[in-house]
Amino acid sequence: MTSPADLRRAHFLSQFDLATRTGLEIGPFDRPIFSRADFPNILYADVKDTAELRRLARASPTRTEADVVPVDFVLLDKQLDEVVPQQSLDFVFCAHVLEHVPDLVAVLNSVEAILRPGGLFLIVYPDRHYTYDIDRPATSLAQFRDRHTRRISRPDPETVEEHFLNHRKVMVGRLWQGLPDSKGPRVFTPEQARNRADTARTSYIDVHCNVLNAREFGNVIKALRDDGLTGFEIADIDPTRAPLNEFYVALKKPGAKAAVRPVNQLAERSRRILERTRRVLGRARRSLGLL
């Protein structure tokens, strides 16, 4: 069954003419957004190789080994531009990846390097107001600059402690309704958060390093561009909408015209996707009591 998130993503991506373009999806595991059946020129990148991902899928009750995609570029601890040829791609896509990276500026620069002029960086990003980051403040511009200046390669202890100290379960549907019981208790004790921070001094602890909403994300990109820390321009930002917890971003590398779908194709494709989106969102809202 198609979910509201699937339809929102499809509607956002439909404005770009990507079907025959050369693109890269980061971290698809067994659930790629861009399948080779529909996008024959899509490539896949992951920090692990195909064999390891298949092993992980076999061991997980929520994964399907047969659906694991073949990894074309194994990153390990390297940046994309260290393993992917420069200016070889028309677009790069990632979903719920950038919030985890310790040095966002380095990743932006790496993606920009492998895109052709006019290429697109297409991003699905969790909104801090509708995830377990709900109690955390927005990551500041000073933090982004500092992390890049220090060239950190793993989350620093302060970020790890903040992540676990403020981590609490949220009920997204109830949040959208404005109900007082939409947030559960915090999951970790202060002592547990400190212990994980201590571990982070010598080991990689996976956390949300970069917590933002759509407006804050846009402001960060603009500020980094003004400071010469990225060349990306904002092509589009589609903000978070009920009943979801994510927003959608298209960043454009300066240069040639971006791969935007011709208006006549866009109108028809968008109309069909929007109709399906409205039907699914309508059912979701009714089930949540939003209508």
Image: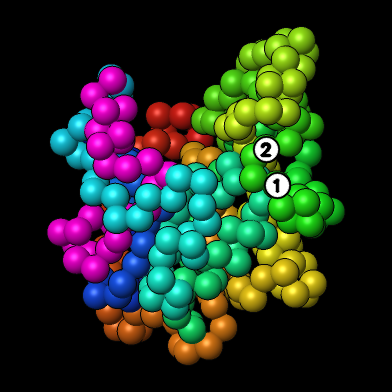
Q: Residue at x 53, y 40 (%)?
A: 245
Residues marked 2 and 1 touching at CB (< 8 Å): yes
Q: Is residue 11 magenta?
A: no
Residue 87 appears in the figure: yes
Percent coordinates x, y for residue 278 in the rendering? 36, 51
Q: Residue at x 27, y 63 (%)?
A: 42
Left/right placement of residue 185 relative to residue 281 reads right
Structural distance between the alpha carbons of marks 2 and 1: 7 Å
Left/right placement of residue 240 relative to residue 115 reads right
Left/right placement of residue 214 relative to residue 15 reads right
Q: Out of 187 and 142, give the one closest to the viewer.
A: 142
Near mark 2 (Cα within 10 A), the count class, few <14, some 14-19 or many ≥20, is: many
Q: Residue at x 15, y 59 (%)?
A: 37
Left/right placement of residue 56 relative to residue 188 reads left
Say the numbered circle drawn on residue 155.
2
Percent coordinates x, y for residue 274 in the rendering? 35, 59
126 w.r.t. 61: above or below:
below
Percent coordinates x, y for residue 189 in the rendering? 73, 10
Q: How is this picture coloured?
A: rainbow
Label 1, on which residue?
152
Q: How many marks?
A: 2
Q: Is residue 43 magenta?
A: yes
Q: Which residues are magenta?
A: 34-59
Report the amino acid beneath label 2: Pro
Report the amino acid beneath label 1: Ile
Q: Secondary structure at mark 1?
A: loop
Residue 135 appears in the figure: no
Name the outermost residue toward the right.
Answer: 142
